[in-house]
Image (spheres, grey):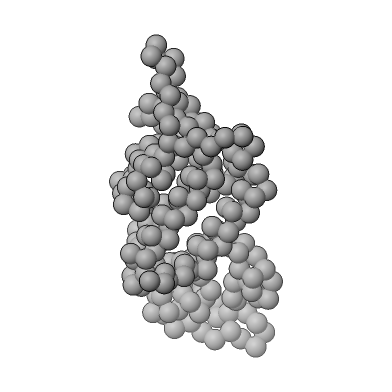
Amino acid sequence: MTSTPLPASLESILGEIQKALNAKLYYPALIANLTLPEICVGLELPPESRTVKKNDYIGFIDKHGGGIIAMGVNGEQCYQLRCGLVHRGGSAAHPENEITHYIFTTPESGSTVHGVPLVDQGGAFHAKFLDIIIFCSSMRDAVKTWHQAVKHNPKVALNAERILSLRPDGVFPIVVGRSVLATGAAMNYLNTYAGIKLGAVAESGQPNRRHNVRQRRR
């Protein structure tokens, strides 16, 4: 069965992660990779919902990640790793994390070790080996598996236009005809989503200010 293509914004993020891996920029690749579960779960939420909960993140990994063999970690461990790295730059930052060292093998390591724990019997360390390429590839597969399960959810396609991504043609009517990295939907797209009929862009190229203010207050 042919899989449904990902929204362009999500495909853009996955592409950026792969480019970072190819350039041996492993830190930004890993940080971006660890945010994918909350991005995906967030796409299922209505716009008034502001946060993705811990259990949502863990559930995404456990349901779509292909198991601990593929990811090398379970949902709880992945969430703790995400919190530790994103907020403090280290695995021990999360108060519930028992793993003292996450060690990622890279193509330069000369060998691949993935999902293997190493625990010092004296309690000096509790290490977990992951391979950066396998880990990021498994997360990419999790995103694709998730999307197949939610592809008929209209919120996903609508919200996908709002996340940070490369916009080759700009963001109408704010930037037109220039490639930018941006969040937020084009104003005509917001019109479809919110059910508000925005005023036509004036001949001067400026959007209707009255409708613009109303939209920002939503």
In the image, residue 134 lies at what x, y percent? 50, 45
Of residues 55 and 66, the one drawn nearer to the viewer in this rendering: 66
Q: Residue at x 52, y 76 (%)?
A: 187
Of residues 185 and 143, the one drawn nearer to the viewer in this rendering: 143
Residue at the far bottom: name it.
203
In the image, residue 156 lies at what x, y percent? 39, 67
Indicate whether 46 appears above or below 39.
Answer: below
Indicate whether 29 appears above or below 145.
Answer: above
Q: Residue at x 33, y 64 (%)?
A: 149
Q: Residue at x 41, y 28 (%)?
A: 117
Q: Quadrant of the C terminus?
A: bottom left
Give residue 110's quadrant in the image: top right
Indicate whether 198 appears above or below 111.
Answer: below
The reply to whether residue 74 is visible in this rendering is yes
In the image, residue 23 lies at what x, y percent? 67, 48
In the image, residue 97 lies at what x, y percent? 38, 29
Of residues 77 and 178, the one drawn nearer to the viewer in this rendering: 77
Give residue 174's quadrant in the image: bottom right
Residue at the far top: name it.
122
Q: Residue at x 54, y 57 (%)?
A: 14
Q: Is residue 81 left or right of residue 176?
A: left
Q: Quadrant of the N terminus?
A: bottom left
Number of numbered discs overlaid on the protein picture? 0
Q: Is residue 133 left or right of residue 116?
A: right
